Image (cartoon, rainbow, N blue to C red):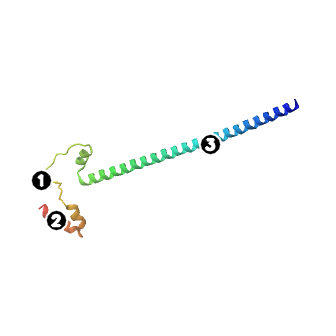
Amino acid sequence: MYGGHVESRSSTAWFASGLAALIGLAVVGLVYLVSAENRFQRGRLHSAVAQTRDAQSRRRSAALDRRCCERLLGDMLPPGVADRLKAGQTVEPETFDIASVYFSDIVGFNDFAVSCHSPLVIVRLLNSVFR
């Protein structure tokens, strides 16, 4: 009986140490899973923050471009005409006794203007074309 009692104690100790080892592994696994979940959530957060910053940057850039275009349009045209164009309306041509505005395109003008060394050459060309 004494031998059986020792054997029983030994198997209980063995079972308890095995159970403790399994609990330790479970705790380590749980800590690892929580850590991995935290890393995953931080990665998602960083990604969401980066996407939000990119979207804000694109909106700011678009707003800046829109303001520049509106300022340029306002500098080139009378306010009423610029407002109608911004609203998507058509603008009928107007004739004045003093002046007319004429828009045209000269094929190759950009290349010519870039290669010119003096703005006066461009002015002379335009004067000769539109006389």
**Dot placed on the residue nearer the N-terminal end, 2 or 3:** 3
Residue shown at the point (26%, 52%) measured from the top left: 73
Three-letter code for the amino acid on which mark 3 is drawn = Tyr
SS type, badge 2: helix
Q: Distance of mark 1 from mark 3, alpha carbons?
A: 84 Å
Name the residue at the bottom extreme: 117
Q: Distance of mark 1 from mark 2, alpha carbons?
A: 26 Å
Q: What residue is pinned by disc 3?
A: 32
Quarter occupied by residue 17? top right
**Dot placed on the residue nearer the N-terminal end, 1 or 3:** 3
Three-letter code for the amino acid on which mark 1 is drawn = Asp
In the rendered structure, the answer to whether residue 25 lies left or right of residue 97 reads: right
In the rendered structure, the answer to whether residue 130 lies left or right of residue 78 reads: left
Q: Nearer the viewer, residue 100 or 103?
A: 103
SS type, badge 1: loop
Three-letter code for the amino acid on which mark 2 is drawn = Leu
Which quadrant: the N terminus?
top right
Q: Please provide percent x and percent y for residue 84.
A: 24, 44
Q: Nearer the viewer, residue 131 or 113?
A: 113
Q: Please provide percent x and percent y for residue 123.
A: 19, 65
